[in-house]
Image (cartoon, rainbow, N blue to C red):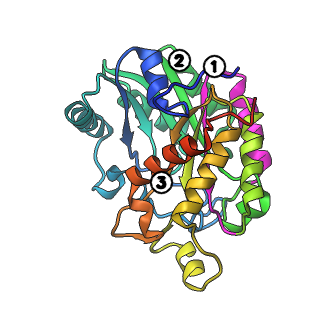
Amino acid sequence: MQRIIPKIKRYYQFSEYLKERFGCKVYKVTIDAGFTCPNRDGSLGWGGCSYCNNLGFSANTRLSPRPIREQVEQGMAFMRERYKADKFIAYFQAYTNTYAPIETLRAYYDEALAFEDIVGLSIGTRPDCVPEPVLDLIENYQAATREVWVEYGLQSIHDSTLKRVNRGHDYAAFLDALERTGRRSLKVCVHVILGLPGESHDDMMATARALAQMDIDSVKIHLMHVLRDTPMEKELLEGRFKTLEFEEYVSLVCDFLEYIPSHISIQRLTADGPRAVLLAPTWATQKRKIIAAIDAELERRNSHQGIKAE
């Protein structure tokens, strides 16, 4: 079902969804629980995805390991002070947050949810790391909190791209995870990356059109940026691919949004990394400028999210 896009933005912001859902300001508190990934520890491969450097996750991953309770307490205090937040979603972000024994996962999730003002749980993971017992565990938290999200890293629907960036799974694995998650009352957010090596405009729009047909609740759009100390750095320096230009990315995001049905919330429109490890594109740090340019381009086109999905 299409929804009416408000005049403030021409796409359905996740912050707007949260305000509608909870009636107050709700912010995510990011958590680094010290997980690893089957694509890094040898189970599937070594080194992880070719673009992955853990320092590119939230600030929590750039600090010494701390108890989850401490991360949540400090995160809530920061969000209250800076954004006047009222309630919070505990967001397990770094690496694969379902890749551990069930009892370990239960202990970590329980610790994060042990606060009155935590009203949701969001778990970032890979589609090949959600066996049925893990999904059963996650589903059980529906009774303890008001809603539960699973965030799947898809990045692209094209197996050739997934292989090139060493994802360690194919598109079929994602579709299987989505189908099994869909049997439960869990909300699903899908991560995609624009500007992946070897992908054309048509390839990226094919991903958008595929998402438009899925039973999902939210999308995160990431810019392909290159961090130091990754295999992608070597590819970039050797000239095997180049990152997107500013105007090119803005246009791509708008094209992408036009295919995404308007009832699907948009959690992110770009991504950056800490300046100390960001190699390219250097403009990726200008997040406000990027979002303002996307807003301006949709206005110039007199377009909006979902216009091509109607």
Q: Which kind of residue does numbered mark 3 sit on? A: Ala
State the residue position of label 1: 185
Residue 142 shows which numbered tag?
Answer: 2
Residue drawn 27% across the image and 56% down it? 64
Q: Position of residue 182 (x, y in %)?
A: 71, 26
Residue range highlighted in magenta: 170-197
Q: Which kind of residue does numbered mark 1 sit on? A: Ser
Name the quadrant of the C terminus: top right
Q: Position of residue 154 (x, y in %)?
A: 66, 48
Ranked by sequence position, the earlier of labels 3 and 1 is 1
Residue drawn 72% across the image and 59% down it? 201
Query: What is the C-alpha distance between the residues marked 3 and 1?
Result: 29 Å
Residue drawn 57% across the image and 34% down it? 150
Q: Position of residue 26 (x, y in %)?
A: 37, 25
Q: Which kind of residue does numbered mark 2 sit on? A: Gln
Q: Does 195 appear in magenta?
A: yes
**Mark 3, mark 2: which one is toward the viewer?**
3
**Relative to 236, does residue 9 appear above or below in the rendering?**
above
Circle 2 packing at 10 Å, graded few (<14), some (14-19), many (20+), is some
Q: Regarding mark 2 in the picture, which secondary structure is present there?
A: loop
Is residue 98 visible in the rendered structure shown here?
no
